[in-house]
Amino acid sequence: MGDTSNAATSELRLIDQGGTNETGSPVTVPAPFPKDAEGGAADSTEVALLDDDVPRGLEKRELTWWRLALITFVYTCSGPGGLEQVVLAGGPIIALAGVFFVPIFFVVPQIFVVSEMGGMMPTSAGNVVWVQRAFGRFAGFYNAWVFALTNAVDLAVYPVLFGDYVGRAFIGTNVSWSETMVFRIVGLGIGMALALLSSKDISNVTGIGCVLTAGFFIVVFFAATPHLDPPAQFNYVEQPIDYGLLSSSLLWLFTGWVSLGALAGEVTDGMVLVKGMSSALGIDVVMYLVALLAAMTKAVRGEWTDGYFVTVYDRIIPGIGPVFGACIGFTSLTLFLAAIICYTRTVWGMAEMGWAPKILQRQLPTGAPVVAVAVHAVTTFGMIWFDFGFIVQVEYTVAAASYILTAAAFLRLRYTEPEAHRPYVVPGGMPVAWLVTATKVIVMVATSVAGLSQDWRVGVAFVGTNIAVVLGYFAYDRAHPNTNSSEGVA
């Protein structure tokens, strides 16, 4: 993305679909893909007017499917961090089942939605634009702020994992809380500095993380294979099962798919999203399976806690624990980088829509939204003082409404804009579109209910966030009355 002080942006004016911001100015998003893009329908009817003579500036489309696959793998997996909480909450059998079933019922629907919507609206604003276009500005504003706030919560998980693993690796199981916090703060500082790189450079860094992670787990898995005995090692379930922690932790293991829609404005063609994300999902499942099977050969019931893989892998290959901890610390930073390039671009999109301060659009020559990065640094610093389990429960309980709105927007736009140019269309017609939406809604409602029933603090965060966002909308609406009659929702 280019410097917003420069007029070098590609302007896409969305006709009769809320394609202006709250000041009445057209929303500027990257140009749509050519009609002959791979997978594009040559006879489809565009619902956009593109000013072809507007210079593109620094808004280069550099993300190919394999680069996106690297970013996606690192962002949505990159290592077993967080898998300990799944075993702790439900036991190894449920953890193993979750690794197989969560991708089917949670991830695949998201890949479908993001690929179709991202190709239809190739903007770095992601689902901020999708929901607003489908339901109008109240739903759009609400979704944008809930999504942005829960993204800020999620971002804290990665410095937390960095601190927990590095501390356990170099100090041991007796690492103190203060020592852990120092490591978390160091991880946050390194991550924020690297976040100022371009998306292309970040994909190169995450590629290194992919190689390190995959190589490490292959070595450990083959070392553990002679000791693998699933009937004996997976024969217990933790009681009582903590459904709130279990569901939130399982979803977090496969987090980030909707956020990847914020990269739609930087991919090289309309099929990159579905190719890149689908490729990464297969690697995700294999990595989690390999990590869990290897760990169970030396794991002891009752020992599971944050950073436990350092201890158990050291039992598999004596002396490798610190190396593994350092490896997971590094991959936690690559997770952080993959997340922040999506999250800050979502905030950039909110500012473009007029729903957040314009200063958040300030960018470096690398395309990094520097002010948005700084804001996320502050909010992340405030969250890293909490433990992993609480952070992910708050994240998914509060974010449920945003996930539901995104899925519903996908379905509604199938009805309201059936002729819109879509480089990728979810196969199966409307029956599959309904199935994808219903599956996502059921999963997120169940997760939200589980989170609210397990921890009163999660309920406070849920109620407080919703009240703040709704009041914020009414204050905004009073200052900027809605004059766009084309929106179906006030």
Image: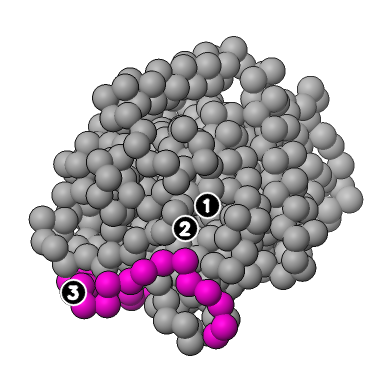
Q: Name the residue under label 2.
A: 261
Q: Nearer the viewer, residue 31 or 325?
A: 31
Label 3 secondary element: loop
Residue occupying image coordinates x 41% and y 49%:
18
Q: Pointer 2: residues within 10 angstroms few (<14), some, or many (20+)?
A: many
Q: Pointer 3: residues within 10 angstroms few (<14), some, or many (20+)?
A: few
Q: Name the residue under label 3.
A: 55
What separation in Å lies between label 1 and label 3 (alpha carbons)? 29 Å
Q: Is residue 49 magenta?
A: yes
Height in image: 61 above or below 315? below
Q: Main secondary structure of the magenta part?
A: loop
Residue 461 coordinates in the image, percent (x, y): 49, 19
Height in image: 145 above or below 435? above
Residue 112 coordinates in the image, percent (x, y): 63, 62
Task: Identify the amino acid type marked 1.
Answer: Val
Q: Which residue lies furthest to the front in this view?
A: 485
The image quarter in which residue 152 lies: top left
The magenta segment is 42-64
Question: Which dot, 2 or 3, sits closer to the camera?
Answer: 3
Q: Mark 1 points at which residue?
A: 258
Q: Which residue lies furthest to the left in this view?
A: 5
Residue occupying image coordinates x 52% and y 16%:
463
Are the residues tagged 1 and 2 within 8 Å (C-beta)?
yes
